[in-house]
């Protein structure tokens, strides 16, 4: 493969939050999920799971119930109602207006199980990292397919709400929402200088 072409895909990808009002075909979505499925994973256990929402009603209902919990949390934090309403509305619109929402989950079912908390916690982190690697593959393939996408970590704050709303299996732990669609906006990249993130030894 041409390294320059891969570098261009990586560096030109952006987090897109506004989409055209047109569907994404099942064939394209399957290619995205196939790319995710080829990610590296701890012990090759492949702990990722994906719930794919393609109906507007499903995306809207998920956005609504998540927004209700979000609003309650903001009010408990003492955020004024008008500010809370703005934040909830923004989150709701990002989710409900996306043609596709992929809920990235993990399952510990096939991961190793240890008798001590230290190693079990490490195993759980490995599963989280593995699911994130799969999601990154999906994001890059989405960009290569001409789609826009955005990673949202909101399910981490309301995993029970997401699991109940989608009737997910008990072992599926929601980690992120990936909104997908044909982009209706352009965004600039913001990156700090690479050298501020490196130690050389």
Image: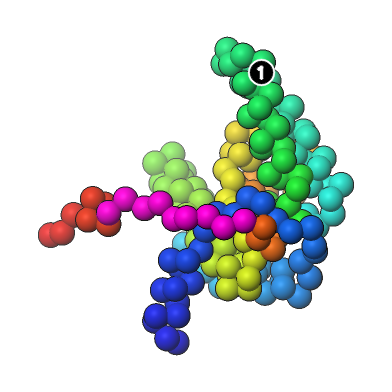
The reply to whether residue 127 is in sight is no
Q: In this view, does 45 lie to the left or right of 116?
A: right
Residue displayed at 58% across by 16% down = 79
Q: Which of 131 and 97 is in front in this view?
A: 97
Q: Is residue 114 left or right of residue 19?
A: left
Question: Is residue 174 placed above or below 157 in the rendered structure?
Answer: below
Quadrant of the image for the C terminus?
bottom left
* The image quarter in which residue 62 lies: top right
Quadrant of the image for the N terminus?
bottom left
* Colour style of the rendered protein structure: rainbow
Q: Position of residue 68 (x, y in %)?
A: 74, 27
Q: Residues within 10 Å of mark 1 (few under 14, many from 20)?
A: few
Regarding mark 1 in the picture, which secondary structure is present there? helix
Q: Where is residue 86 in the image (x, y as percent from the top left)?
A: 66, 27
Q: In this view, does 182 lie to the left or right of 128?
A: right
| Residue 189 counted in the magenta span | yes
| Residue 181 counted in the magenta span | no
Give the residue at mark 1.
82
| Residue furthest right as drawn | 57
Question: Is residue 32 placed above or below 130 in the rendered structure?
Answer: below
Which region shows up in magenta? 185-193
Residue displayed at 44% across by 73% down = 8
Residue displayed at 80% across by 64% down = 23
The reply to whether residue 187 is in sight is yes
Q: Position of residue 69 (x, y in %)?
A: 70, 27
Q: How many marks overall?
A: 1
Residue displayed at 67% across by 52% down = 18
Q: Which of 176 and 124 is in front in this view?
A: 176
């Amino acid at each position: 493969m041409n390294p320059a072409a891969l570098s261009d895909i990586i560096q030109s990808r952006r987090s897109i939050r506004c989409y055209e009002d047109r569907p994404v075909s099942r064939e394209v979505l399957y290619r995205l999920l196939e790319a995710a499925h080829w990610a590296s994973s701890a012990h090759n256990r492949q702990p990722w799971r994906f719930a794919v929402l393609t109906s507007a009603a499903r995306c809207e209902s998920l956005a609504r119930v998540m927004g209700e919990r979000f609003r309650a949390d903001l009010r408990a934090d003492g955020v004024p109602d008008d500010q809370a309403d703005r934040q909830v509305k923004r989150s709701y619109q990002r989710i409900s207006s996306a043609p596709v929402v992929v809920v990235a989950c993990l399952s510990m079912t096939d991961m190793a199980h240890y008798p001590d908390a230290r190693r079990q916690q490490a195993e759980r982190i490995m599963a989280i990292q593995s699911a994130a690697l799969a999601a990154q593959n999906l994001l890059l393939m989405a960009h290569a397919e001409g789609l826009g996408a955005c990673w949202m970590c909101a399910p981490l704050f309301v995993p029970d709400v997401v699991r109940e709303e989608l009737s997910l299996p008990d072992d599926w732990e929601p980690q992120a929402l990936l909104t997908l669609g044909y982009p209706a906006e352009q965004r600039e990249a913001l990156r700090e200088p690479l050298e501020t993130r490196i130690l050389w030894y």
